[in-house]
Image (cartoon, rainbow, N blue to C red):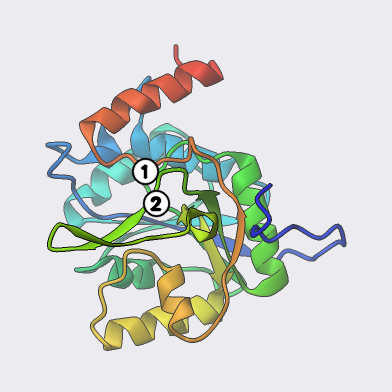
């Protein structure tokens, strides 16, 4: 395990009621159609994502955030696949931040932790899920990450300005897990300031709060391009899940 990863303590920690919020509101122009509904093996992408969350014993309920025109097909998929933890399916906002906020507002009142997980990230393992949730229960904010293996350079106008130390660089994945009150306040502030954030940790970081990193998984990729679907089929085949 890389030395900068936060390590899980051995002591027993009570896990609060955890609601998973799944942003699945955006279409993908690169995919040519709605990527969350695309087939991946014998199941749609979103179904594989939700089944992984459904199987996690530390997640009590799921809120899916999608577009208005997808409410009916997503609802039908949840019924067809017996996704009993799906508590609500709601319409998202104009941005990721507003969409996640819409999902958080539908969480049950007893929710103590919010786990935000991309709808197009169907290969998350139970180990990645549980590690992030347990760490967030301990310190308030956590996300899985993997060390960057490529050399990263900062450039301006096509000219290299700096080579960054990759020993300090991590690619952050989801689920990103937070105390419910913390992430709601952080995202609300970001929305009021009109900020466009690419992940939810950034909103918490802007409040001066620390986010612990837990071990991610290279296979926990987000499906963004048609090539990603081919990679995804390879992952399923390697896991013996491709019929």
Q: Along the line of sight, which residue is nearer the eye, 128 or 116? A: 128
Image spot of residue 91 (x, y percent): 26, 62
Dividing the picture into quadrants, the one containing residue 190 is bottom left
Mark 1 or mark 2, earlier in chain: 2
Q: Residue at x 54, y 61 (%)?
A: 19
Residue 192 seen: yes
CB within 8 Å, label 1 to label 2: yes
Location of the C terminus (image quadrant):
top left
Between residues 119 and 160, which one lies in front from this camera angle? Answer: 160
Query: In this image, 81 relative to 17: left or right?
Result: left
The answer to whether residue 16 is visible is no
Badge 1 marks a residue whose secondary structure is: loop
Q: Position of residue 92 (x, y in %)?
A: 27, 64
Horizontal side, residue 10 vs residue 191: left or right: right
Q: Label 1 neighbourhood size at 10 Å, few (<14), some (14-19), many (20+)? A: some
Q: Nearer the viewer, residue 156 or 211?
A: 156
Spatial separation of the CA atoms under disc 1 and disc 2 = 7 Å
What residue does disc 1 label? 222
Task: Work out which residue is located at the far top of the displayed protein and give it.
Answer: 243
Q: Position of residue 173 (x, y in %)?
A: 46, 52
Residue plotted at (25% across, 29% down):
227
Near-viewer residue (31 or 37): 31
Q: Disc 2 designates what residue?
A: 118
Near mark 2 (Cα within 10 A), the count class, few <14, some 14-19 or many ≥20, is: many
Locate residue 242, reporting x and y percent: 45, 15
When the figure is inspected, residue 16 is found, relative to residue 65, above or below; the finding is: below
> Dot 2: what SS?
loop
């Amino acid at each position: 395990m890389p030395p900068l990863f936060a390590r899980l303590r051995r002591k027993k920690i009570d896990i609060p009621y955890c609601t998973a919020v799944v942003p699945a509101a955006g279409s993908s122009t690169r995919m040519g159609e709605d990527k969350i509904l695309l087939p991946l093996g014998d199941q749609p992408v979103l179904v594989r994502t939700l089944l992984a969350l459904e199987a996690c014993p530390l997640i009590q309920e799921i809120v899916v955030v999608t577009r208005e025109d997808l409410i009916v097909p997503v609802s039908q998929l949840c019924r067809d696949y017996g996704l009993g933890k799906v508590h609500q399916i709601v319409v998202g906002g104009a941005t990721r931040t507003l969409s996640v906020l819409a999902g958080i507002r539908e969480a049950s009142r007893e929710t103590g932790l919010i786990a935000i997980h991309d709808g197009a990230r169907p290969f998350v393992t139970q180990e990645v899920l549980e590690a992030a949730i347990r760490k967030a229960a301990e310190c308030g904010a956590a996300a899985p990450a993997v060390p960057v293996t490529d050399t990263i350079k900062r450039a301006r106008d096509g000219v290299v300005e700096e080579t960054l130390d990759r020993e300090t660089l991590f690619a952050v994945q989801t689920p990103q897990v937070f105390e419910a009150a913390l992430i709601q306040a952080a995202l609300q502030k970001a929305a009021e300031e009109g900020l466009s954030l690419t992940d939810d940790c950034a909103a918490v970081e802007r409040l001066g709060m620390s986010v612990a990193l837990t071990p991610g998984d290279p296979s926990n990729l987000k499906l963004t391009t048609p090539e990603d679907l081919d990679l995804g089929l390879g992952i399923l085949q390697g896991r013996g899940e491709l019929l």
